Image (cartoon, rainbow, N blue to C red):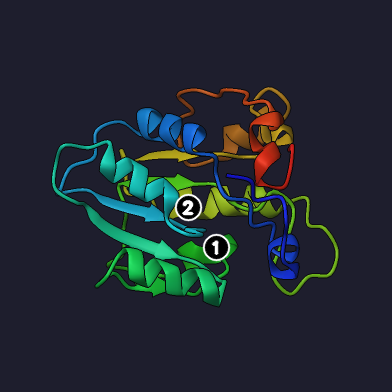
């Protein structure tokens, strides 16, 4: 399916749906998901990443923490995951605004790479902020799998990754052409 026609909101908020194949790879990287897990998606979009992770599991559904700033996408999430609260937080600050009881042990994320709500110019630190805030919210020993910009690689920014509250287990380059039918080649 081609999603190359973009709305103003999609362009402004850098909303690019994750291709199914890449979503499946994130579920493999995340590992087994069980009913005792708490899975968070800080920029949940339409729910593809948690849907694939849950579908790839032969266990019952984990508890979910979903967040999405787009009203249209929040409505989709409430229909896809009935009974799950969907937050409306700028995910750059998700650690600061979730209640203390909301502590995921699993995080799947594909945040905007260089845009922030209510900012007219590009924000090169946006992806950094999304990643760090999610890691700060993650339970000790938890797992995070993120799709981030190529310029946010541990090879290019070892000093940044060294200061994160986590131990990097792997970094894989995915060519941007996989997103060509989703409105970008980043």
Q: Is residue 110 visible?
A: yes
> What's the distance in space between the residues labelled 2 and 1, CA to CA?
8 Å
In this figure, which residue is indicated by the disc labeled 1? Answer: 91
Q: Against 48, is 71 above or below?
A: below
Residue at position x 51%, y 33% in the image: 22
Camera-side residue: 63 or 83?
83
Q: Tag 1's secondary structure?
A: helix
Q: Tag 2's secondary structure?
A: helix
- Residues marked 2 and 1 touching at CB (< 8 Å): yes
Q: Against 44, is 20 above or below?
A: above
> Where does residue 165 sit, x and y in percent of width and height?
48, 42
Left or right: residue 161 compared with residue 78: right
> Where does residue 16 sit, x and y in percent of width and height?
63, 51
Q: Quadrant of the N terminus?
A: top right
> Where does residue 75 sit, x and y in percent of width and height?
44, 75
Left or right: residue 112 compared with residue 87: right
In this figure, which residue is indicated by the disc labeled 2? Answer: 134
Q: Quadrant of residue 10?
A: bottom right
Q: Is residue 97 visible?
A: no
Residue at position x 53%, y 74% in the image: 72
């Amino acid at each position: 399916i081609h999603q190359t026609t973009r709305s103003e909101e999609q362009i402004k908020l850098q909303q690019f749906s994750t291709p199914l194949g890449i979503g499946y790879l994130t579920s493999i990287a995340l590992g087994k998901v069980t009913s005792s897990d708490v899975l968070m998606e800080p920029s949940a979009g339409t729910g593809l990443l948690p849907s694939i992770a849950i579908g790839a599991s032969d266990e019952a559904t984990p508890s979910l923490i979903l967040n999405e700033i787009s009203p249209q996408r929040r409505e989709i999430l409430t229909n896809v995951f009935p009974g799950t609260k969907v937050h409306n937080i700028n995910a750059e600050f998700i650690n600061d605004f979730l209640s203390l009881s909301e502590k995921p042990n699993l995080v799947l994320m594909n945040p905007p790479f260089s845009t922030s709500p209510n900012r007219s110019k590009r924000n090169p630190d946006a992806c950094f902020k999304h990643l760090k805030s999610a890691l700060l919210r993650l339970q000790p020993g938890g797992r995070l799998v993120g799709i981030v910009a190529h310029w946010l690689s541990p090879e290019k920014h070892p000093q940044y990754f060294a200061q994160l509250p986590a131990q990097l287990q792997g970094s894989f380059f995915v060519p941007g052409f996989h997103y060509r039918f989703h409105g970008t080649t980043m």
